[in-house]
Image: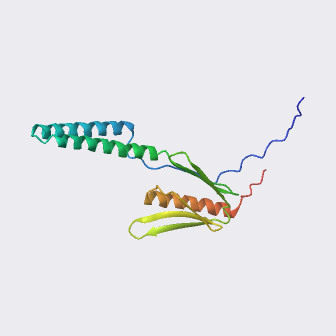
Amino acid sequence: MTASNDFDPEPPEPKLFSARLTPHRSLNRTGFLVLMAFISVVSFVAGVAFWMMGAWPVFGFFSLDVLVIYWAFRINFRRAKATEDIVVTASELRVRRVSHRGHVVEWVLNPLWVQFEQKSHAEFGIEGLYLVSRGRRVSIGSFLGPDEKASFAKALMAALQAAKRGPTYNPVA
């Protein structure tokens, strides 16, 4: 016989801010296949032209170029699997980073004590965003562009200010 418990667990705290950051990919799978087909055809035609002129070793170098470009794009696609989740509630700021290899690192900070820092360059804009708390400095949004970092920083600072103000009182009528 099992005992019945009418106790409902406390509902989760409402999120003041939630973002999933991912690296930018400029090419999808179809674009990649079209680009590789184009590069292969151009390299093959140029290689055959050199072969007919008697410079047959050049054909191998054109093939090597195609392989290096393919390898570079494969690395780019693999690294694009990385993510960074940032969630702010009234009582905690959670940063969860998953690398492209699947390694997970997570930081849980108190939003009341977190300082938000940004490193800027006069010519290039925002270069780095950091959360500082209790001597720890956590870099966030490292793969965002300068404009994306600026809008992300603005939204995150607003959420941290809302967390520092505390929960708002909503009287029930």
Relative to 52, is 81 on the left or the right? Answer: right
Q: What number of labels is visible?
A: 0
- Where is residue 130 shown, x and y percent of the image? 55, 63
Residue drawn at (17%, 40%) of the image = 46
Q: Residue furthest bottom?
A: 122
Relative to 63, is 74 on the left or the right? Answer: right
Figure quadrant of the N terminus: top right
Residue drawn at (51%, 66%) of the image = 118
The answer to which quarter of the image holds residue 29 is top left
Q: Residue furthest front?
A: 57
- Residue 133 against residue 169 in the figure, above or below: below
Residue drawn at (68%, 64%) of the image = 112
* Foreground of the two, 172 or 3: 3
- Where is residue 23 shown, x and y percent of the image? 46, 50
The answer to which quarter of the image holds residue 55 is top left
Q: Is residue 154 visible?
A: yes
* Foreground of the two, 162 or 74: 74
- Where is residue 124 shown, x and y percent of the image? 39, 65
